[in-house]
Amino acid sequence: MSENYFKTYPNETGYFGNYGGAFLPPHLEKEMKKITDAYYSISKSHKFISELRSIRKHYQGRPTPVYYCGRLSNKYGGRIYLKREDLNHSGAHKLNHCMGEALLAKYMGKKKLIAETGAGQHGVALATAAAYFGLECEIHMGEVDIKKEHPNVVRMEILGAKVVPVSHGLKTLKEAVDSAFDAYVQDSENSLYCIGSVVGPHPFPMMVRDFQHVVGVEAREQFMEMTGELPDKVVACVGGGSNAMGLFSAFLEDDECEIYGVEPAGRSLNLGDHAATMTFGKPGVIHGFKCYLLQDENGDPAPVYSVASGLDYPGVGPEHSMLKDLKKVKYDMINDEETIDAFYELSRMEGIIPALESAHAVAYAIKLAQKYPRKSILVNLSGRGDKDIDFVVDTFGLPEDRKKAEKQ
Ligand SMILES: *Cc1c(COP(=O)(O)O)cnc(C)c1O
């Protein structure tokens, strides 16, 4: 891997190897160019960097700790460590890029943030950032998702965001993206479009990665301080791939670290029952960029499913797509059942209730620990599980109930 990884990727037109770019109608192309130029000129300034640093410390509560899971490691072998993004303000890593995007909007003189949201996690994080900066916030959300994710809709409204229901097509994330793009084009003078992961057209995959890089930088330094070495293995779950890029980006030049991205194998390996883009996808274009993509027989984005709604995206960040081809990161899968087991295991062994997304990474770390009992494993615990507790207990029962049911 080149020493100048960040200077090399993406290239000037937003490509990570064969992936990324900006596949857009001309009027949107112009808008993205403006955002790119603003990002390059503003985000590298001393003033911007020191303001963001101060926000990270005093508002978000960073650095978040790295924690050694003593009981879990004793039980399974290995040495398992967690980067505690669940302790970042608002309970997940997403606020890291939302605060960066909102600060950029402020420096650009914008008054409004516009985005779409699927399960509502990005919407809540962006509404939080908008409240902090006193910006308007408009979140586009499919009507089906609005019904399913009621608590997040209420959170956004409490935070002062306007939730715009999207009622065409399947009324979920894809339609919400179109609707948010349209709203942005109508009002690009006053507003900034803010994407929720390392996806979308250039410059977003780069911008979101750069804003999440703080996770890896902190974790690397904290881990070295705790152990005197680098971790043998680094693990994160991959939906769009932002929490994973945040952690991985600090270890890509360390050839001794093995890096693992974990995707959801869902309820079966049939198309429609999982979101394992890296394992089953082929290169294609979605939402204005090229990446590995789960496709149906017509080459359109396939339906996807995961017990963790933050991971059910048929595409994946272009940088992950490149890192797979370069074999710099190994991508593997964890299914729903293993995820629920890990959700309870971390709760009961360490007193930490993980988000279902993060529980995929924890499940994989437990497998690695059993296979490599002498190795150290650093996991990105991307978020807390409060949002998932009712769903998990209602759908799967407590561990005691599940054992009883198995015996019968
Ligand atoms: C949204 C979300 C994810 C998935 O998004 P990435 O961009 O892949 O990181 C993972 N964990 C949590 C807690 C989330 O809210």
Image (cartoon, grey):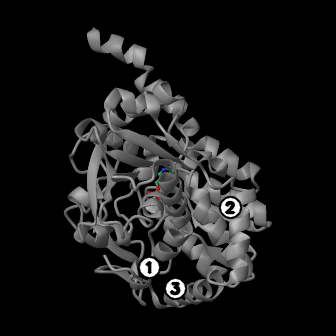
Label number found at residue 56: 2
Residue at coordinates 26% horizontally, 51% vertically from top-left? Answer: 332
Figure quadrant of residue 181? bottom right
Q: Earlier in the sequence, mark 1 or mark 3?
A: 1
Residue 94, x across and y down, in percent = 57, 57
Q: CA distance from mark 2 to mark 3?
A: 31 Å
Quarter in which the N terminus is drawn: bottom left
Quarter in which the C terminus is drawn: top left
Q: Is 4 or 9 nearer to us in this picture?
A: 4
Residue 136, x across and y down, in percent = 75, 67
Residue 38, x across and y down, in percent = 62, 87
In the image, taking residue 367 as reference, residue 357 lies left or right, namely: right
Q: Earlier in the sequence, mark 2 or mark 3?
A: 3
Q: CA distance from mark 1 to mark 3?
A: 26 Å
Q: Nearer the viewer, mark 1 or mark 3?
A: 1
In the image, taking residue 404 as reference, residue 36 lies left or right, namely: right
- Residue extending furthest front? 228
Label number found at residue 311: none
In the image, taking residue 142 as reference, residue 162 lies left or right, namely: right
Q: Nearer the viewer, mark 2 or mark 3?
A: 2
Q: Earlier in the sequence, mark 2 or mark 1?
A: 1
User: Taking the image as drawn, is residue 274 in sight?
Assistant: yes
Residue at coordinates 69% horizontally, 82% vertically from top-left? Answer: 46
Above or below: residue 381 compared with residue 71: below
- Pointer 3 residue: 28
- Pointer 1 residue: 6
- The amino acid pointed to by label 2 is Arg
Residue at coordinates 74% horizontally, 76% vertically from top-left? Answer: 106
- The amino acid pointed to by label 1 is Phe
Report whether the residue tagged 2 is closer than 8 Å to ligand 1. no
